[in-house]
Amino acid sequence: MESAVGRTVRLRAAAGCLCLLWLLLKSVPSFGKDTLLTTPVTPQPKPDVFYEDFIHLNVLNKRVLNDTEISVDYLCSEPCTVTIEAIASLEFRTGVSVYKERWENDQHLRTTRNRTVNLKFPNSMVFRDDYFIRRSVIVHTVILYAWIIHKQRGIPHGKRKEGYLQAIAKDYTLLESVPPFERPYKEHRVCMKWSLEYTWRLQANIMRWCPHENDVVEILSFPYASSGEMTGIVKKFQKFENRELEIIRKRQNGYPNFTFSVWLYLLHYCKKPLCGILYFIDSEEMYSTPAVFLTNEGDVHIQIHLLRGGDVAVKTTFSLPLKQWLRLDLSISGGQIEITSVGKNLKIHRHQTFIFREDFYFDDTSGYLALGGSGYSSSIEGYFGPVKYYRLNGLETRKISNPFYKEDILERIDLYYQKCFAVQSTSPRHGFVQKHKEQKCLYENYYLEMINKYGGRPKDAAFSWRQELLEKYYNMFKQLQETGLQLSGAPEGQKDAILEIGRSLFETAAQNLSRADGLRYINSSVSSLMDSSCCGDHRASYALGVIFEIGLGRPADPAQGLLYSLVAAQGGDRLALMSLGYKHYQAINGYPRDLELSYAYYSDVALKTPRDQHVSEGDQAFVETIRLRDEELLKAQTKENGDIFMWLKHEATRGNAAAQQRLGQMLFWGQQGVGKNTKAAVEWYAKGALETGDLVSLYDYSIVLFKGQGVKKNRTLALHLMKKAASKGLPQALNGLGWYYHNFKRDYEKAAGYWLKAEAMGNPDSSFNLGVLYLDGVYPGITGRNKTVAADYFLKAAESGHMEGTLRCSQYYITGNLASFPRDPEKAVIWAKYVAEKNGYLGHVIQKALNAYLELSWHEALLYYLLSAETGIEVSQTNMAHLCEERPNMTERYMDVDCIWRYYNFSVSQKNAPSFAYLKVGDFYYYGYRNQSRNLDISVQMYAQAALYGDAQGFFNLAVLLEEGYSIPHHILDHLGIDRTINSSNANVLQELYERCWSYSNQESVSPCTLALLYFHLRVFWKTTLHSGLIYFLGSLFVSTLVVFVIQCFRALLVVHRWISRVPEEAAAELSSTEENTSETGSAEHREPTVSNNSEEHVLNPQHPCSSS
């Protein structure tokens, strides 16, 4: 009964609960059947209420992970489209869309809706590298955008960005990126082969290193003296190895973004309309973006190549200041150019912006960058300081990091020109006083006279500054008084007179230093050289550079030496340019190794060298390789009054064609100790051509007639003589006829015909000239230029020693714009150096050094050999070291460096050093030279190099080292051409070395190599004999012989002993018989004298006892 009641109560309670649950369900939102994610909100919207569209992003976990869940709340007042997009900024790309989803809402309007979205990002953004995901990208930022657009205001599909900007409602949030190595590995649903999986696991934890690259390039870090020639520093930029950097570089070809920052010190504005600061030359040898020039008014001219083709140019409204350091910053970003001039204190002087609507084209890997001059433009006159290039960033000036580097030397340059300005401005004042001494102020001697006469000092307005300048520039004023130079009032006249003062000061100082004890007065000479340098004679500048750098007669001052070397190089001094080129090539004396900078200096001299040869004036001579150790060549040196010259002159007067030819060459080029005398040379050329009809003289005389060198031009006679020589088959004359038709008649067909004939006969000038025809595009029958064929002809000429052909090839090697001449800066330097070392001004200095040596003028020889040795020419370096060995006391007294050590080491660093120099340096390292420790490795290298040149001493020294237990490296033996099969045994190597030593030595006399080889063979024989069966036979024979000898000796001793024991007995018996017959014996003695004589003989010859009987 109770159970029934209880059951009824429970049923009623359950029914009540169900009713309550049904009511609750009626009062809450219900999920629609169309989707489980979209929830319509009740109650329904009221039509008379205004509803505003909105959208809101709810992100619980903001880290960029795979399948990130977000919630979107939004309300649409009209039918709309809801869009969600994730935009990522990667390491090398920005604005990349990595996720996008959109849906439409047409029914649930004016009600707040909610939607859950799972973001799916690319695998490379959310997982680590593995075998399938080869490369995870680095993500900087991810921005998640959400927006609503009403349908009636729909925006075309191609304008999605505008859709966000014009959205009715929008929202965004930032997501946090995850570093690649913090990301999880992805569980791939792909099975790998076990070998691939194993390989991946081995490499899974390897840290991959990206190529270390920077888009900031330091083009120049050392001062560069620019003389205004058509040469400069050439740089070529390669593609980035880093893939991301290379992608950015390629994208910027049509939208450039870069910066150049250049320190400049300008001495003059351009003599031509434009001169180069920096510019790109593309692979087609055309100006590219950017091309920056200085104008003749000091403005900056900027030229840009457009993407559509063509060029545009702008010019600054401001000009650059002279004789002060400034930094020129050029920044290009898209179509905007910003150029800024900054001073030493980094304060902006001038700034200008140019904006273009057209796109620029920029590709820094096509072609090369020229800093200064090139084959298309002259350089500025002045100095370049540090230069930086930002390849991928257009920076504001305040963000550029290019400080005033090498501040000491840059400041010294500035101070030098300030001082020289005072010196140069003093000369016109002095000339003014000289010219107007009868007016207000009188000449200095008048004041001295007044002082001596009256004891007072006259009042004069010019006296105060004159006394100060007299004390400061005494040498210059003294030179002015001695020469009595009058300065013109015109600027050009003043400039020429100042140069004349400089020349006079230099000549006086050089004469003083060339005296027998000239180096004792080095300090006073240095003062004169400083004034001469300021007056524009840069021979003095170079001499000062050497004196300060070496420490000649004073303590060394490398910084001051560098200053004067740069000043001399900027002034175009050939020796200074070569010296700087050599030191940057070899990286000596603290100079950084910079092949492009070295080439800039060497090519400057190389360009001048052919021009210098056609100038009859100037102190020039032929560069001859004459070593002080070569007695035969020293005896062959002569002068105009020397025996050899006088003999040649005598023979030439008698009509000897060879003597006439040789005299003409000696006088024209300044050879064999004879000074250059073009007029005298032409007289001998004429005599040989017109009187004897010598072919070479005919050609030489015709050339000087064509050019008017030492004689008045006569083209008619010159052509006649040239044709006469050519008809006899002289290759030079055939080339000359081609030159005539090319330059005077413009008949390229005839010119090519003659050149082809001469080229077939091996004439290098013709090869070069044919190359010029192809390069200029005027070769008969061929349309257009052919740079490849032209370069082949230039190379052929260069291989025969042609200077201009060698120079052309060096230009091809430095630019790398031709496929047949891949870029090789070192080869370019070597070829330009070859041409530069043919310069006549260098030959004159070497000739003066040699003449001084032959005249026993040691101080003068030391000075001029020092000046030429510092240019890097090998023969002068070797001769300088030899002179220092001969005169050690002089060099140790006046030089602050170890002369022998320095110049022998410099010599062996050259490619054409003599073998004895290698032996010297090898001995230095073998024995340990002074403070230098022994280094057998270097010693072996030096001896091996001498051996390669066929020096027997080199082989002998290597053999000695091998006998002392030093193991010669295999690569050196391979270099010597010693077979690998011999290398395995030291004895075989030793034998090979001694045999080569003997073969290269004088075989007519007994040399150390001969004795060493004989001794080696004796040792080998003894060693071979000791280890063979023959030694036992010889040993037994020796022992047997020794035993027989001992027995015979023993028997001989026994016989002697018996005889000695019998002698007393016989003597006693004889004595007794003598006593008994005394009288008889006496009478017998008179009768038989022979018996007595026989008895006496028996006593004297005891070895014959039987003779008495």
Image (cartoon, helix red, strand yellow):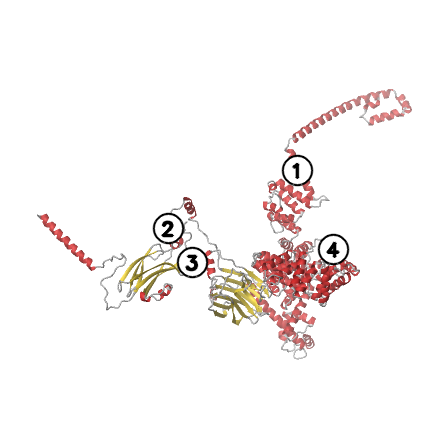
In this figure, which residue is indicated by the disc labeled 4?
635
Q: Secondary structure at mark 1?
A: helix
* Amino acid type shown at disc 2: Lys
Q: How many marks?
A: 4
Q: Secondary structure at mark 2?
A: loop
In this figure, which residue is indicated by the disc labeled 3?
91
Which numbered circle lies on residue 1019? 1
Question: Which one is nearer the viewer's eye here, 827 or 1018?
Answer: 827
Reply above or below: 2 against 303. Answer: above
Which numbered circle lies on residue 354? none
Front: mark 4 or 3: 3
Front: mark 2 or 4: 2
**Does the CB distance between marks 4 and 3 fall below 8 Å?**
no
Task: Please tell me which residue is depicted at 48% across the width and 54% down the height of the picture.
Answer: 211
Q: Secondary structure at mark 3?
A: loop
Question: Which one is nearer the viewer's eye here, 989 or 299?
Answer: 299
Q: Where is residue 567 drawn, in percent x and y?
A: 60, 65
Q: CA distance from mark 2 to mark 1?
A: 76 Å
Question: Which one is nearer the viewer's eye here, 556 or 616?
Answer: 616
* Amino acid type shown at disc 3: Glu
Q: Is residue 598 visible?
A: no
Q: Residues within 10 Å of mark 3 (few under 14, many from 20)?
A: few
